[in-house]
């Protein structure tokens, strides 16, 4: 089984090779194993998926870290963590979450400029940059190459200022972030505008982008990493609700015709998990 160092080096290599790669977002050990069985090369956690699993509108840092531990142990793939705002406003306090995530087994993770307070959703520019800088320092202090992603959240929280979003991404890049991320981009032209303003790899989340876009188009536009955030979790819940409503409203059970084959599930779940090895 791969060590954490081997996973970290593999994850870095995915960002260095030509073209874009897909990094889907499981929300528990089962979905992680299914994605690994299909042949994906890396996985990413989703805080929304964790919240959905817990039946909560929000999720604590402890729950996020525990989910990191579960998904990292489920397969032999490198895992990137959605760490939200890293659980704190103050830069050094937030940066400590990077170490906690690394201890949980992930080899990459994100810090974002969404405060968690919807009345004042985005950290002031200077503080946002200082937080990224502190996270970079924490990542560089680890005994393996942790891939740090810095996220500019303007577009998800009513601040439709693309110039400020690019300014923030460029500042995060200068502060040492390895990957940049601006959720909320939709059309290919805007994606190209953002990517062309950056030198380091860019992560695009397809939960907000035009679903007709393809990996080939995004790769040509310069996107390096393609995630889906909580989209697969929400799709699974949509199917769950459809099944429930059929039973409640129609008294029928035709949805069972679309069940996943039990053999496929058992084969995926029988796969050996990653060994608990360190860097």
Image (spheres, grey):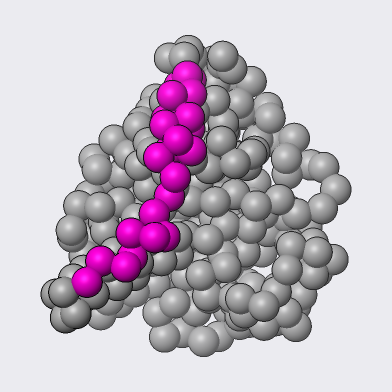
Magenta highlight range:
252-274
The residue lying at 37 percent from left, 36 percent from top is: 29
Quadrant into which the C terminus falls: top right
- Is residue 27 visible in the rendered image? The answer is yes
- Residue 133 seen from this side: no
Say which residue appears at 62% left-offset and 64% top-offset.
Answer: 204
**Above or below: residue 24 compared with residue 160:** above
Residue nearest the observer in this picture, 140 or 124: 140
The one of 278 and 167 positioned closer to us in this rendering:
278
Residue 97's quadrant in the figure?
top left
Is 18 left or right of 250, judged from the image as shown? Answer: right
Magenta-drawn stretch contains 262: yes
Q: From the viewer's perspective, is residue 21 above or below residue 164? A: above
Q: Quadrant of the N terminus?
A: top right
Instruction: Report the front residue among 185 and 42.
Output: 42
Residue at the image point whose x is 82% and y is 53% from the top: 19
In the visual, does 176 lie left or right of 26? right
Q: Horizontal and vertical percent for residue 277?
A: 48, 12
Q: Is residue 118 left or right of residue 100?
A: left
Q: Is residue 77 left or right of residue 216?
A: left
């Amino acid at each position: 089984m791969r060590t954490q160092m081997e996973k970290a080096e593999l994850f870095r290599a995915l960002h260095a090779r030509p073209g874009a790669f897909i990094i889907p977002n499981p929300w528990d050990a089962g979905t992680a194993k299914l994605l690994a069985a299909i042949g994906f090369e890396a996985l990413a956690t989703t805080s929304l998926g964790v919240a959905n699993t817990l039946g909560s509108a929000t999720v604590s840092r402890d729950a996020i870290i525990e989910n990191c531990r579960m998904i990292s142990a489920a397969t032999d793939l490198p895992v990137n963590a959605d760490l939200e705002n890293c659980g704190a406003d103050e830069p050094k306090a937030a940066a400590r979450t990077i170490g906690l995530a690394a201890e949980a087994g992930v080899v990459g993770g994100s810090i974002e400029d969404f405060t968690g307070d919807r009345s004042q959703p985005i950290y002031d520019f200077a503080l946002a940059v200082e937080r990224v800088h502190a996270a970079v320092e924490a990542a560089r202090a680890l005994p393996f190459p942790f891939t740090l992603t810095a996220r500019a959240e303007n577009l998800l929280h009513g601040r439709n200022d693309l110039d400020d979003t690019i300014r923030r991404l460029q500042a995060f890049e200068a502060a040492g972030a390895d990957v940049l991320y601006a959720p909320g981009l939709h059309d290919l032209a805007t994606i190209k505008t953002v990517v062309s303003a950056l030198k380091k790899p860019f992560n695009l989340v397809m939960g907000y982008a035009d679903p007709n876009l393809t990996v080939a188009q995004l790769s040509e536009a310069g996107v390096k990493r393609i995630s889906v955030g909580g989209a697969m979790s929400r799709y699974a819940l949509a199917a769950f609700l459809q099944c429930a409503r059929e039973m409640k409203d129609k008294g029928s059970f035709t949805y069972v015709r679309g069940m996943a084959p039990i053999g496929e599930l058992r084969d995926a779940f029988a796969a050996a998990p990653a060994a608990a090895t360190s860097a």
